[in-house]
Structures are given as C-alpha cells and as structure tokens.
Amino acid sequence: MQLSDDVLLDMHHRMVRIRHFEEAAGRLAEESRLPGFLHLYVGEEAVAAGVCAALTDDDQISSTHRGHGHLVAKGGDFERMMAELMGKSTGYCKGKGGSMHICDLDLGMLGANGIVGGGVPIAVGAGFANKYRDDGRVSVVFFGDGASNIGAFHEAANMAAALQLPVVFVCENNEYGEFTPRDRTMAITDVVDRAAGYGMPGVIVDGMDVVAVHEAAAEAVDRARSGQGPSFLEAKTYRFYNHHGIQTLGMKYRSDEELAEWKKRDPIDLFEARLAESGVLTAKDAEAVHERVAGEVEQAIAFAEESPLPEVESLYEDVYSGVAQ
Amino acid sequence: MTATVGVIANPIAGKDIRRLVSFASPVSDMAKIGIIRRAVVGAVEGGAQRLLITDDRRALGMRAIDNLSLDAEVVFLDAPPYDSGMNSQNAAAAFQEEGVGAVIVLGGDGTHRDVVKGWRNAPLMAVSTGTNNVFPRQVEATIAGQAAGVVASREPPIHEVADQAKVIDVELDDGEAEQALVDLALVDESFTGSRAVWTGQRLREMVAAIAERATVGLSCIASRVAPTTRHQAGGVHVTFGDGERFRIPIAPGLYSEVEISSWRRLHLNESVEISGPGVLSFDGERDLVLPRGRSALVTVSHDGPWVIDIEKAMSLECGEAR
Amino acid sequence: MTVTEKEARTLAYGAAFNEGLRQIMEEDPDVFFAGEDVGKAGGVFGSFVGLNETFGDLRAVDTPISEQAIVGLGIGAAVTGLRPVVDVMFMDFMFVAMDQIANQAAKLKYMFGGKATLPLTITTSAGAGLSAAAQHSQSLEAMLCHIPGLKVVMPSNPYDAKGLLVACIRDNNPTVYVKNKRLLGLKGEVPEDLYEVPIGVANIVRPGSSVTVVTYGRMVQESLKAAEELAGEGVDCEVIDLRTVQPLDIDAVTTSARKTGNIVVVHEAVRFGGLGAEIASQVQEQAFDYLDAPVGRVGAPFTPVPFSPTLEAEYVPNADRITEGIRETLGM
C-alpha cells in the first residue's frame, strides 16, 4: 500500500496531538488540577491514529476508559476536551461525563466508556444501523485485551459476525488488564485467536507502527464497507504511563526494564525517523508540528481554566429527552 | 556429549495481514502448542536428552511441555518483552554455543531466516507453521521431532542426513549484512508496514534462490520463467516492467498479475546490485527500507543451513530397507 | 358511525401489541425490532407473529441468545438515529443485560451532556402464575424504576398494550415495556387506528370513594375483581391503573388519596423494596393529613417465585389477597 504524503503527515499530526494532549492532562492531574480518574493513551497513539486515518468523518467508533486518544484521533476539539476533563460547562459533556465518558457524536465518536467492554455492543449496534440504512458507514470498536474477557465482547463479536455487520474490532493489547499481566488472566496470548471462533478473519499488527496499523485497518474497513462483514485486528502495544496515568501513584506492577524496552519503540519516534529518512517530514518540520500542537494544548488549558463551572441547576438537566425537570 | 535438541517456535507466525487480504488460514496458539508438544515428544523419542526451548510472552514452549513427563532436561531461553525476529536469531546463536545437535524450527520462511541470521550453518529440522512457506515443508511435527532427536543423539556426519541450503546474501552499502532463504525483492513502497507483499504490481526487481512451480508467493514468479529447485545451484534475477504477463498465486487464494521485463539465471556467488528507492522484502516480508541513492549487493550462495531430510535421518533409527 | 364500529372491535392483549408494532413499523421506516426468536419464529409468546414475513430479516431481526448484545444493538442503533425495539424474552433475563440497560442506555444522554438521543424501546415479559419458576416469572420493575434515565410502562389491558407500545417507540428515551405473560390472551376493545396512550399518565379504571387501590399490570384485573366483591359490602373502591411506573403519576395517586382517605398499593412484585414502598412514602409526604390509616401494601412474599402450582398460588397476589388487604387497611 503506497500512502500519500498527506496521509502520512495526517497520521503524524494525529499522533502528536494525542501525545501532547495526554501528557498535558497527566501533568494537570499530578498537580491536582483535574478531578477524578485519568487513563492516558500515551504509547498507543499509532493504533488510534492508524485506524482513524482509514475512516471517514461519518464512520463511528466506540471507545474505552482510555478514550481521549480515540477522540483526538477522530478529530476531537482540544478546548472542549480539556474543559470536560476539568468538569467545566464548556466541555464536550457539559462537565457531566469527564474523562471516562468523553464523546463527540457529531464526529461519530460514540463515547469513552467506564465499563470495560461496555462500548463493544454499542458499536455493533451502530454497525447494524449502518447496514440497515445501507449508507456505507463502518463502525470501529476499540477495546483492550482485558475487555476481551468480558461477556459483552463475546456476545457482540458473535452477533456482528452472525449478522455480517460492517464493524471492525480493534483490540489494543497492551499486556495488562489494569495491574494484572495478561498471562495471569488468559490462557492465550493473542486475543486474535478468538476471531476464528466467531467466524471472522483476524490479524496481528505491530501497534507501535502506525503504517502497519493503517494498512491492516484500511483493508478491514474496506472489507466492512463493501459488505463482507466484520474483521478483527489485534494491535500489540503498550501504555507508557500507569493505569491511571499518574507516575507518582507508585504502582509497581511492571518492571522499569520492560517499560524501557517498549519505550525504545515509541511509535512517534519510530514514525518520525522514517518520515525524515524518506524526506516526507524533516526533523525540523516535525519539531514545528510539536510546537504548534503544544501551543494548542496550552490554549485549550487556558480556555478550560477560564471556562465557568456548570450551574448547579444543570444537575437536573438531560436525564431525559424532551422533559423539563 | 549430551544429545541436545533446540526448539524455536515463532509465536506470531500465521497471524499476519494475509488473513485479511487473502484467504490464508490463521494458526492459533493452541495449534502451535500442539505442534511443539508433538515435536518435543518425538525429539525425546529419537534420543534427545536435553531440550533448549525458546520462550516468548506467550509461554508457548512452557505450556507445550506442561504435564508432559519427558525423559529429558528442559531449559528455557529468556524472552524479550515484545515479539521480534531477534528472539529467534538470538536463540539460534545461543544454540550454536551450546552445541545443539539439531534445531527444530516451527514457523514460516521468516522464522527460518531469523534462525539462519543467528546460526548460518544450523542443522535445521524445518517445520512449516506459517502462511505460504517455501523453505520449510509441511511435515508432521512428531516425526520431524524424532528425526531431530536421532540426528542430535547419533551425531552422523551432517551431509549424510541433511542437504545444505542456499542463502541469498544481501550486503548493504552501509556495511550491514542481511540474508534471505528463498527470495529477495525490491518493492515500490516507502514503509515496511504490515510486512507482507500481496500485490505483484508494486514489484520492481527480485532475486530468487528457490523458484519452484508448486509454491505460493514471490518465489513462484521466478519459476514461471526459470524454474530452479532448492537443490539446484544458482538463482534467478527478475526485473519487472513492460513485458510478459503472468498471473501467479501471490498469497493463499489470491492471484495477482505480474509483468516481467527481463530475467536471467544467476550463477552461484554471482552478485547483482539492487538500488533504492523501495523496500526490500526478504522471503515475502517487507523488512528494510532502501532509500533513494542506497543500494544492496545480492548474491546467491550455497553455504547455508543444513536441512535435515527426515527419510535419511530416520533410516539411522530404523535401519536401511531390507 | 365508523369510529364506534372500529372501537367495538376486540383484540387480545398480545395481538394488540403485534398490531401496534406493525402499524408503527409501517409508519416509520426507522423502526425495527430484534431479539431471540422474534423473527421467523414470531416470538415465544407469538407476539411478533407475521412481522418477519412483512418486514424481512433486516427489520424483524433474529439475534443470538445474547441479552447484552441485544440491548447494546439497540443502543448503538438508537444513538446513530434509528428507533429500535429490542426484546428481552423474559424480564428475568434483564439481569444478564443490566450493564447495557442501566449503565449505558439509561445514562448515555446524561453522561454526554444531553447530546445523545436514545429512542430505544426494550420489550419484555414479566409475571408469575404459569409454573415457570424462579427465573422466568419475576416482576422486576422496581429495579428499573430506581435508575434515572429509564421509563417503564406496564400495560394492564389490550388498549393500553397497543397505545403504550406506540408511545414508547415514539418516545426519545430508553423505555422498558413490560408485558404480563398471563394477560396475553385477555381480550378488549382496541381501535384499529394507530394511537398513543401517553407515558406517565395514570388511568382511573374504577372511580370510587372509600379507598384508593393503586396498581398496574395484571394486578389491575385482580384489583377490579376485588373491588366488585367489596362493592357488595358497601366499600366503594377507586382503582387507579398507573400504566407507567417510571415516571410515576403521583399526582393522580395523591389526588385520589385526598378524596378517599385510604390507600392500598397492589403489585405482583415482592413487597419488600417494591413500588408500593415508594408510593406509600410519597403519599405520606404529600397527603399525610388526609389519610385515615397507614398506606396498605399487597405484594408477593419475600421468596423466589416457586414452581409447584400449590406454592405459586400462595405466592402470587390475587383478588382475595387484595380484598383482604383492603379490609385490613379499612380496619374491617
């Protein structure tokens, strides 16, 4: 698959946006400037970026508790995201969802999800609607290795295959379900081994290589779009920060050596090296992208901090549609 | 000396993008564990007293010997934290130092290539568990394991039980050296990406050491103009462009058109220069970016690994025909 | 007059459901239904019979036995613009799908700051009395009513069975529509036209002056029998059919309580933690001074639903138990 420079630069931009947004969010959390839980996507950027670059704006994705990266990759707005993380009224969810429920339905991002595996059946439902309307849209389910052990995943995967829905299952296998290594919770290593059991093709891709992810995603999306049913991608990846994204939490569930080994394969570093080598993006130009994005993040933080907190009365709003409470 | 058999199992063989772009079958971990288990049982039956087994994040090796009562010492090699061809390469190098008498390799062309990078003249029991393999054959692991055990324990002169394979040496202009076992191709791509090559349209140039008609993949292209068996000396150099068209099975269940502008047979140890830009594919997997202005010197030699012939090895165990 | 002729037509409760679904599917191409056995087989209770033949596999969808995925299918389709009806065969099976119902469907709109609209209807069947035992007989509405974001209706007659279904499907919120299995054959007048029974509006099915009996679902029929019996003793019961249990039409209840001064809540679900407790509490908050006696509650005992007909007869509230409960409240 020969990718145009535009696609390559676009994927780079998406990854850089995720990295800067997440690292800023992590810093804000450490400074106690963000309430609640925070699960950072740093390290896994190639997966969201590689997959979302294969989607149109009309395609849908459902996400996980580690969902900021998916929203950014789908085109999420920094200001509304940061405001949501701070619980401000200008946030994507008016301060009612926070990190774990961040969403933008206009971008087809059907929400992060606080329940592991909870988003899987929902994306399958979106896939059903796409097939129902025959509108050529595809829905993508992002989920982790841990979610692949929950019943909802199995039910939804089977249903997507049984009904031949235009859905792509993207498993972000980062080797840990919360703090417990995968080999203590599964007797198989490759989640993709389960795909055959549902009757869909499954492939493993290097989740640290955005081009590898994109190639496979593009094939799977084409397959879904052309009515050939669901497929399964397993991206081998790694989260660089702790489960809650705060280094100072003191969790010692994995070794420094292991982390260091994975960081050698930082998906952004790897990609930038290749882009520089092929003359698509010089190191200097890459730096400029980082600076510009970092500036946008700072601007978003300022916007969020200046934004008002929600009016207390809004507690009672939006429980139901069409009902003044 | 303790009869030692090494086992290298590639955990990720049989799961790449060809399951999406063609009709290649997946090979699950459970299937691989079964293959390792059968190979190990066979190896001990054949006389192996010590087994060195690579391990990986999947613990395929450990799970394979779980609950087996083997009359042999079992040693596991440490695994890196993520999948990499270096795992197989390092294991092969370690096996050479440990004086391993036969190496059972469970994987595809790519896995065998990694092994050869670590130990060029390894005595190999090549077992295919990958996708569309040319170098390793489809053999039942039980008997392959037993043959490896026989070779390791009886220590026959290797040429009596094995055939030496060809190697495609790739010398890069920056001094780096790489190898392929079946074919080397220059593909019109910029990235290694998902690694597999599944369209003939992007091929620019290739050198094949094995060009057998009964295969699936790139090497089969060369067989259409200059069939060359694995035992025959020399190779084939093919350039693509305007010329004669062929439809070839480039992946399982997937045919692709290729257009060959020229070809010629290569003598043993004769070199061909291949120049970038493009991505070099080794045995059907994109693995190295060759930027514009860079080049590689490609040579087919006949001093590669020793591939154990099961019939010959087993004749040591069973005796000659009566 | 033609309208009278139409209204004179009688239909069974199950058939009324079926007709309502058929008509709204004819009206709105975004409506489809999905569930176990609801397509080709027409549903285990026959409620969906004939619809697959008319609307095909894409609008009358047979699913795997996967309650979570069935509800999730509805959520995903609803949030992306369709108007799904998903069937959970027995209400007991809702526990299997509770994450999708309670954590996802009920909360998406709120969690998303109002952005999501979920015109999702979950249909199901509740009720004991068929020796279906502990996992196929429960009435679990209280559990659903406790979750902000859901609406719950429990029709007691064929007219409401059709009208409430139409209202649920047209509603832009996740609604749970609970049929009672033992009402499926109950016949009553059902207009042929498509009509709605508004959600959240109770119905005084029998006006009276001595005591207010607040009930819903199949217990409406039993309460009416009890009222008839007590009428002979000079007790004039006002029977209120809540029709919707979330949102609760508490005004209808308190208005009646102020009038009669006595109130008994009747439901088939277990008494402990049931709707009766909520209604009693709200009535005493709002109409304490009007009450002549503590609010009475008739419900099932705190046991699982038993299998043996003898035991089940003891378990399920009926007209006699309701009569007894009313007498107790009235100090008779």
Image: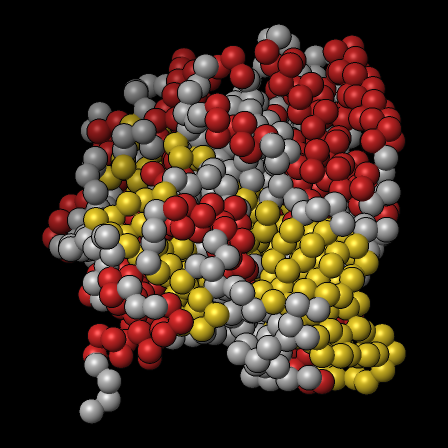
**Compared with residue B309, is residue A200 higher up or lower down, i.e. above or below?**
above
- Residue at (51% x, 38% y) in the render: A174
- Residue at (44% x, 35% y) in the render: A177
Instruction: Please identify the residue farthest to the bottom as the structure is shown.
Output: B322
Q: Position of residue B37 (x, y in %)?
A: 28, 60
Q: Position of residue C272 (x, y in %)?
A: 27, 30
| Residue C116 appears in the figure | no
| Residue B99 appears in the figure | yes
Front residue of C87 and C4: C87
**Compared with residue B204, is residue C297 higher up or lower down, i.e. above or below?**
above
The image quarter in which residue A68 lies: top right
Front residue of B73 and C69: B73
Instruction: Please identify the residue farthest to the front as the structure is shown.
Output: B157
- Residue at (48% x, 14% y) in the render: A249
Which colouring convention does the figure follow? secondary structure
Question: C291 left or right of B49?
Answer: right
Q: Position of residue B33 (x, y in %)?
A: 34, 58
Quarter of the figure that contains the N terminus of chain A = bottom right
Question: A306 left or right of C169?
Answer: right
**Compared with residue A300, is residue C192 higher up or lower down, i.e. above or below?**
below
Q: Position of residue B284 (x, y in %)?
A: 63, 65
**Compared with residue A17, is residue A9 higher up or lower down, i.e. above or below?**
below
- Residue at (39% x, 18% y) in the render: C284
Q: How many marks?
A: 0
Instruction: Please identify the residue farthest to the top as the structure is shown.
Output: A31
The image quarter in which residue A104 lies: top right
Quarter of the figure that contains the C terminus of chain A = top right
